[in-house]
Amino acid sequence: MAEIARILVADDEPHIRRILQFLLEKEGFEVLLVADGDEAWKAVTSFNPDLVLLDVMMPRMDGYAVLQIIRAGFETSRLPVIMLTAKGEDEDKVRGLRDGANDYVVKPFNHEELLLRVTNLLEATRREREANPLTGLPGNRAIEREIQTRIESHQAFACMYVDIDRFKSFNDHYGYARGDRAISFLAGVLMSCSRKYGCTGDFVGHVGGDDFVVVSGADRAADLARHVVAEFDAGIGDLHDLGDYERGYLEVESRDGRVQRFPLITVTIALVADAQERFSHPAELSDTMAELKRYGKTKSESVVVRERRSAPGTPELVPALGIDDETDVN
């Protein structure tokens, strides 16, 4: 069940407060009304809103002063704020935006437009909070929500779990900055291939580290996955030092001083191509993909692993690009 967003309305005009309360509560928001700036900044801490509708001209403290307090607080510095004012002069808008307001609405406002601005800003803020800081892609909560939505839609979809093989040895050898570069490269490959070879509405999420999830159409997923492998493999030469790439392995010194050899990084994709109505919860789908991934990790090259059509749950390697899809390579 989705969480109910809390909205603080700060306006000294009673009829404006009543209108906003009616509009917002009708949309399912929890609303707190205050009538002046002093009450407003105190309510930011006590009510813990998800968004503030803040009038500029209020007694005891104006909206600009309240906004400065909000932006100066560590826990409230990124709180979404929409400024409300009866003035329409450009300098008032510029001042509010310069002081850190996310949006600006001039009274009298169009009801539908204001609601759209509120919902759009709440959605943008939620996505920003859930995004992985390295790649900017949706994180775990968004991934689970996307998969649950697909499950409940009862429409055909495919899901794949993607991660880099031997990433730890790569990270140990080259350092975290190069590791982040490899992760960002894979994220770019997933986004690019989804646009070129996937379906409208494909979802790419970043679980964390070198792990990703892609949700796509059931009929395009295997081809999409093969293109991801091909594009990732084509770029690994730029991720490794030339000498390591030409040798075909990395030499990594262990804690006890022994030097171990590791193959270059590759990618494993665990693919469940027919997830429709097979799972009731994202965790069940995750368990199936984890089993497929374990099998893929036993291979030294980049692979796409899916279930056999004749025996669901049994791993099958998807042929590389240029080979007929139905060829059994096991």
Image (cartoon, rainbow, N blue to C red):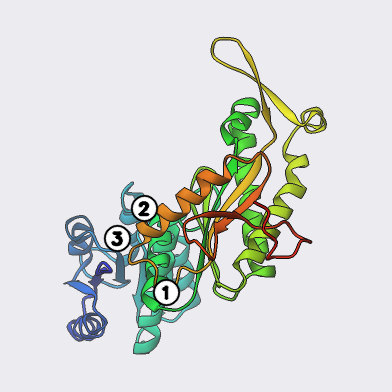
Question: Decide: marks 3, 2 in contact (CB < 8 A)?
Answer: no
Question: Decide: marks 2, 1 in contact (CB < 8 A)?
Answer: no
| Between marks 1 and 3 in the image, the one whose residue lies nearer the viewer | 1
Sequence-wise, which precedes: disc 1 or disc 3? 3
State the SS at label 2: loop
162 or 302, which lies in front?
Answer: 302
Sequence-wise, which precedes: disc 2 or disc 1? 2
Distance, label 2 to label 1, CA atoms, is 19 Å
Q: Is residue 108 visible?
A: no
180 or 257, which lies in front?
Answer: 257
Q: Which amino acid does label 2 sit on?
A: Ser
Q: What residue type is labelled 3?
A: Val
Q: Name the residue under label 2.
A: 77
Q: To which quarter of the image does residue 222 belong? A: bottom right
| Dot label at residue 120 | 1
Q: Position of residue 114 (x, y in %)?
A: 37, 82
Q: Name the residue under label 3.
A: 66
Placement of the N terminus among the 4 image quadrants: bottom left
Q: Position of residue 74 (x, y in %)?
A: 33, 46
| Dot label at residue 1 | none
Count of numbered marks: 3
Distance, label 3 to label 2, CA atoms, is 12 Å
| Between marks 3 and 2 in the image, the one whose residue lies nearer the viewer | 2
Sequence-wise, which precedes: disc 3 or disc 2? 3
State the SS at label 3: helix
Distance, label 1 to label 3, CA atoms, is 23 Å
State the SS at label 1: helix
97 or 43, which lies in front?
Answer: 43
